[in-house]
Every structure is written in C-alpha cells, then in structure tokens.
Amino acid sequence: MIKKEINLKKTSVAWMPEIPANWDLKRGKFLFKSRKVINDKMQCSDRLGLTLNGVIDRFEGDGVGLNPNDFRTYQIFNENDLVFKLIDLENKNTSRVGFVHKRGIMSSAYIRVVNNSNVNMRYFYYQYFNLYQRFIFNMIGQGVRATMSPSDLLNISVAIPPLEVQNSIVEYLDKKNNEIEKFIRNKERLIELLEEEKQSVIRKGVTKGLNAKNSFKEIGIDWVGEIPENWNIKKLKFCSNIIYGISPHENTYNDKGVGSVLVNGPVEYSDEYFGYTRELKWTTDPKKFAPKDALLFCLRGSTTGRLNICHADVSIGRGVAAIISKTNQDFMVYAIKALVDFISDSFKGSTFPSVTSEDLNNYLIPLPTTMEEEIEIVKFLNEETKIFDVAISKAQKEISSIKEYREALITDLVTGKRSIKQLQAS
C-alpha cells in the first residue's frame, strides 16, 4: 500500500521547520492566558504536585516535594489547566509540564495557563511536553536567564491543527501512553525484583559462605544472622582503614587542579552514583586522599549509604569516607553492600539522614578465616551478580527504548510529520 504523503509548509520555527499545510502556527498568547489566583483565603484545600509522572494528588506526609507551613501563598489551578515549572532551567532532570486533572493548589512559583474551551488542552499539553522532552525550554532560558516568565512561555509558537485532528491525536496518544506506562511499570518492577534477588545472593555469600556442610553459630546481628563457626566478626575499623574527608578550605588547596569524588573528572564511576555535585580541589594533606580502588561511602544527605569505587587517587569531602580493606578489598565491597542494603531503611524519611564516623567505625563485618575463602566467595559472587546485571541492563535498555519511541511518536504527531492513519497503516 502506498502511503499518502502529507502536504507540508515551511515555518520559521527552528525546532518545527514544517507543519501540515492546513494547520495554523501562532504564538501561544493568541490562544492562552496565564492567570494567577492566590489561595489567600484558603478557598481550596486539595493539594496537587507536579512530578516527572505528571500532576498528582498530594497528601500530608507523602514525601513528595516540600511541605510549607502556610498554603495561603499557593495558587489555585482548575481542571484542564496547564502547569509549567520554568525555573532553574539549567537543570534538565526535573519536571516542567503538567496537565491538571482536578481543581487544586500548587506552588505560586509555577506558571498557570488557563483552559481554553475552544481547543483540546490535552493536545497542547502533549505539544508543550514535547518541547520539554527536547529541552527547548532549557535552550530558550539558558545563560543569564535561568527562568522563563509567562510572557516568555506564551511567545513560543505552537502548531494548531483542526479541532477534530487535535481530538484524534489526543485519543491515540492517551491510549499509547497508557500502554507504554504499563510496560515501563512492569519493567521497573522486574528490575526491583532482580535487585532484591541479587542482594539476597550477595548477603548469603558474605554471611554464610559457599560450603553447604558448614556448621553455623548465631552472633546476634540482624543483618548477618548465623555465620560459619570458623568465621570471625569484626568492627569495620579493625578490618579496614577508613579515611574521612574534610571541608574544602583554601588553605588546603594547591595548584594541581580540581578533583572530585562526586562528579566526572579524575574519578570514573560504577553504575551507582552519589547524585549530587560537590567539587573539591586536591588537598595537600595525604591523609585525605582516597586511593584508587577504595570503596567510597556517602555519609550524609539524601544519598546516605550510596557506594562507589574510586578509580583514581582523589581528595574527598567531609560527606564521604573511603574504605580500604585489610583483607580482600572485593570481599569487603560485597560485605558493605549487604550491610547498607539492610540498614538503608533507617535512612528513609529522615529530614537529613547521616551515618556518623562512630557508626561506620563500629559496623560489624563477618570475615572468613582465610584470604583464599574470601577470594573464592568473590569469584562466585562476581559470576552470579553478572547474570543479574545483564538482565537488569536489558530491562533498563528496554525502558530507554520505549521512552525514545514515545518521544518520537509525540514529536511526529504534534508537529504533523506523520498522521494517525500513517501510523496505523505502518
């Protein structure tokens, strides 16, 4: 079957160079208005939140976003409005656009675009969401302008298909998006199960060993349970050297350049990462260097308990400890992974979670009596965890692929590059 080509016309918009000939192209201000109605008299009590998963209902203690003391500073949104968070535009990994599903209140820092009953607002949600996916807002607001105002937003040109086309695009994208979200949820759950099973294998390996004929003894440590009778249990400070970082101070700097255990540069990272970026210059104090192959342990903040491997000598900040085993370093890495997995629940829900140097020093670690047994366990765990890592990587790639497909699908439809009939015929 020969697909009918779409008759296109050129535009002056860099990210949308062509649209169908029967579509209009206008600045948003000719379709929409931005209105801010402050909740100063507590006219509305239903809280909403803008997240990477869209606009959601908020509840006290739900752990999503900030919880101000007074919601009188919030603004009121109505059903079918659009909401935009166009601040801190240098950050590409945050929510930007949402479709409001019910009347509720959200931050006064957000931009509200009010419902226009003459168009399908969900179509324009998809079009603005596509700009977010393609980082168009970030490009427009980059440099000295780390934010966009309502007038900046509504000066952006939007493609306007006939209303019946808007409706059909929304119907198609809503259906496809639901299918994609279900696929992603299933894959994310699979990853969770694989991670749980992987951690179970690690914990069993570093606490029970590989000899099925071992006799065991109870040592009274929850995360360990029983260990082989010939094993020992030691505080971390007695079976490893622990280096604690320092606060950056210009008197400790020299001219060797910038190093960091938290950002790309002198240190490369494993799949796990700390998630924030504090840079420190190289210190002249050798006691504050994390040597190559040391295990890095995050001591405070939202990333408490995160682990990483140091792939170069580097200075470290006070929020990080470097652990160097006096026995087999790889065995120690697995043992602390198992420990952190068990104690991580104690970090959740804390305003500012942390592990003190006393905590870390006194964590109890089970140890085989010989280096040979440690090496044997490490070899086994390397082989077993690789199986899980391959399966997890495959699921993550499938999630990335389906997200790329969704982005391309939305782009094609909201710009008229492809029609629904073409997609259905392909």
Image (spheres, rainbow, N blue to C red):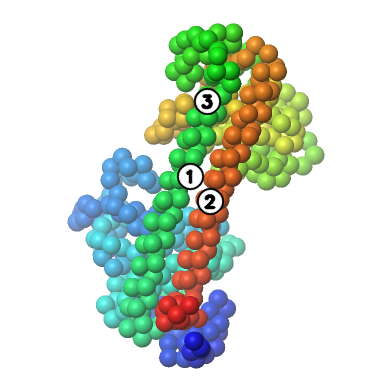
- Write down the residue under mark 2: 396
Q: 53 left or right of 380? A: left
Label 2 sits on a secondary structure element that is helix
Label 2 vs label 1: CA separation? Answer: 8 Å
Q: Where is residue 285 in the image (x, y as percent from the top left)?
A: 75, 26
Instruction: Write the residue at 57% across / 63% down.
Output: 142
Q: Where is residue 43 in the image (x, y as percent from the top left)?
A: 19, 56
Instruction: Write the residue at 75% across / 36% down.
Output: 312
- Write down the residue under mark 1: 191
Checking the image for residue 203, the label placed there is 3
Q: Position of residue 387 (x, y in %)?
A: 58, 40
Q: Are marks 2 and 1 in contact (CB under 8 Å)?
A: yes
Name the amino acid type tagged 2.
Gln
Pick the residue in front: 122 or 191. 191
Rendering quarter of residue 173: bottom left
Name the amino acid type tagged 3.
Arg
Instruction: Write the residue at 26% across / 77% down.
Output: 117
Of the two numbered discs 2 and 1 on the same chain, state the one appearing first in sequence. Answer: 1
Rendering quarter of residue 287: top right
